[in-house]
Image: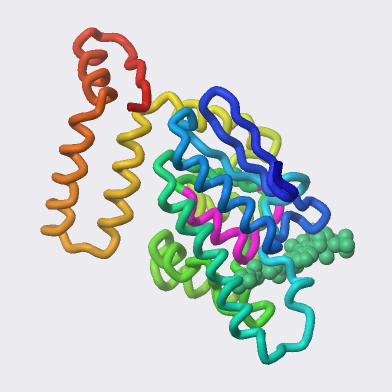
Amino acid sequence: DFQHVLINFEAGVLTIIMNRPTVLNAFNELMIQEMTEVVEAAAQDETIRCVILTGAGRAFGAGQDLSAFAGEPSANDSEAAQEHLAAYHRLINSILQLPQPIIAAIHGVATGISLNIALACDLRIAADNARLSEAFARIGLVPDGGGAYFLTRLLGAGKALELALLAEEISGTEAARIGLVTSSVPQSGLEETVRALALRLAHGPTRTYGLIKKLFQEAQDKDLAAVLQLEGKYQSMAIETADHREGVQAFMQKRPPKYSGK
Ligand code: T3D
């Protein structure tokens, strides 16, 4: 049982709900820890074929809980800050290493570290009226939680720096236009859209999805020769999957494939 995270498992889809709605799901240490625990456990559970990350109440998340930052700096702060950041890093890494696809469903505010955690997910669907911002500079901080990494890769260096320096809110519609999120939909249709996408992925070749994720992550900093080698490695693993055999058989038999995720 968790204090700040709700989970729901249905039809192969695990929904993780950040649950501190009175502070718009701002992160405290316990919520970081509980989310990491849930994501790390999901990675080991083959019955989970897709994960959704969302927020309770009227927001996805308002970033770090700033009440923890309100005191005067003290001699211990630097060490405490490093530990605190390490907890975020573990969460980000657990999301990146999750073998199953993970979708962030973004409504209301998604700011600071909450937005960057959404950027670590594989797909992001936003309500068209969502309010996304790299708010860090507004409180004199640099983007952390992998912001510089994710933003530059998704948007290119120029747009990424613009969002980080100006720290302004953009709508879900604008976020979809610039490629910060996969797509935007009216808020009333967000839940249904994300559920349909999650179910589609949950019926897909889960092991292959995991291999695709690894291949694309590892390809980020490689040249073509190295990527060609990497894809050979992952393709030979994909060829071994039951779902690859099923996909080919289904094609030959002119029927829809029935993937087991194995
Ligand atoms: O190293 C690390 O720790 C990682 C670093 C991370 C840094 C960041 O994440 S930078 C971003 C930090 N977040 C912010 O700067 C956002 C602060 N919040 C706001 O600016 C506004 O709340 C919003 C623009 C997000 C939403 O405005 P609005 O008017 O819709 O709602 P509100 O009334 O301001 O907020 C509702 C309640 O949530 C309110 O509490 P109250 O007055 O009802 O008791 C508000 O104080 C609380 N809340 C919102 N955000 C936070 C928060 N409480 C603590 N920390 C928050 N981040």
Ligand 1 location (quadrant): bottom right
- State yes or no: residue 223 in magenta: no
Q: Is residue 145 above or below residue 74?
A: above
Q: Is residue 250 above or below residue 218?
A: above
Q: Residue at x 26, y 18 (%)?
A: 246
Q: Main secondary structure of the magenta part?
A: helix
Side (left or right) of 55 relative to 200? right
Q: Is residue 1 above or below residue 169?
A: above
Q: Which image quarter is the C terminus in? A: top left
Residue 168 makes an appearance in the image: no
Q: Residue at x 50, y 56 (%)?
A: 119
- State yes or no: residue 115 in magenta: yes
Instruction: Residue 222: give x, y in percent of width and height.
Output: 21, 63
Of residues 142 and 11, the one drawn nearer to the viewer in this rendering? 11
Q: Is residue 76 above or below residue 262?
A: below
Side (left or right) of 208 relative to 170? left
Q: Which image quarter is the N terminus in? A: top right
Q: Residue at x 50, y 65 (%)?
A: 89
Residue 236 image-quadrant placement:
top left
Coloring scheme of the render? rainbow
Instruction: Residue 128: give x, y in percent of width and height.
Output: 63, 46
Instruction: Residue 143: give x, y in percent of width and height.
Output: 55, 73
Of residues 51 and 195, the one drawn nearer to the viewer in this rendering? 51
Q: Which residues are magenta?
A: 107-121
Residue farthest along the bottom direction in this orientation: 75
Side (left or right) of 84 relative to 202? right
Instruction: Residue 137: give x, y in percent of width and height.
Output: 62, 78
Residue 6 makes an appearance in the image: yes
